[in-house]
Amino acid sequence: MSSWSGAAEKIVHRPDLGCAVRERKIAPSLERETAHIFLMKTVSAQWDVAILVCRKCSKKAGGGFGEKGRTPLAKALRARGNGKKGRKASLAVVETGCLKVCPKNAVVAINGARPKEWLIVPKGAVLDEVAEGLGLEG
Ligand code: FES
């Protein structure tokens, strides 16, 4: 266990509990208040950009993109990435639940770096224009 270093709170690693414990000194007594916090790990990803696409809109549009108009927007956008999947993809396209916009014959898409600007993509829109609207390069 570590000692108090003037701070009112400290984190003590407790392998016996499998987590770290936050201890707070309650002045003027020496009693301690503890709360369990769990150590969180991080993993790296190669994502340059993350695009959110409403899955429900896509389903209602019956695909709606690509040459035959049957490809879902998420799949069509993923094809613009580096061809890798998951964390190794350069362009992440994440399908979400309903975003409460629910346009008719269109799909809601959001660039994660520009969360205040949601794009309503009409069914059958040209993918280059969609990519430009989402701020994707090339
Ligand atoms: S169905 Fe897509 S925003 Fe509601």
Image (spheres, helix red, strand yellow):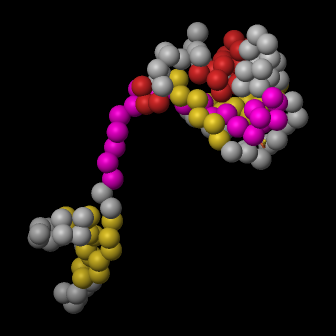
Residue beneath the point at 29% across and 77% down: 34
- Splitting the image into 4 quarters, where does residue 35 fall? bottom left
Between 138 and 91, which is closer to the camera in this rendering?
91
Q: Position of residue 79 (x, y in %)?
A: 59, 16
Query: Considering the image in quadrants, where does the C terminus appear?
Result: top right
Q: Position of residue 104 (x, y in %)?
A: 88, 34
Q: Position of residue 39 (x, y in %)?
A: 30, 57
Residue that lies at the very extreme toward the right in this rendered image: 104
- Splitting the image into 4 quarters, where does residue 106 fall? top right
Query: Considering the image in quadrants, where does the N terminus appear?
Result: bottom left
Magenta stretch bounds? 40-62
Q: Is residue 134 above or below residue 67?
A: below
Residue beneath the point at 75% across and 32% down: 58
**In this view of the protein, can residue 123 be seen by the observer?**
yes
**What is the tally of numbered marks visible in this picture?**
0
Q: Is residue 116 above or below residue 100?
A: above
Ligand 1 rendered quadrant: top right
Between 101 and 24, which is closer to the camera in this rendering?
101
Q: Is residue 46 left or right of residue 66?
A: left
Residue beneath the point at 82% across and 41% down: 102
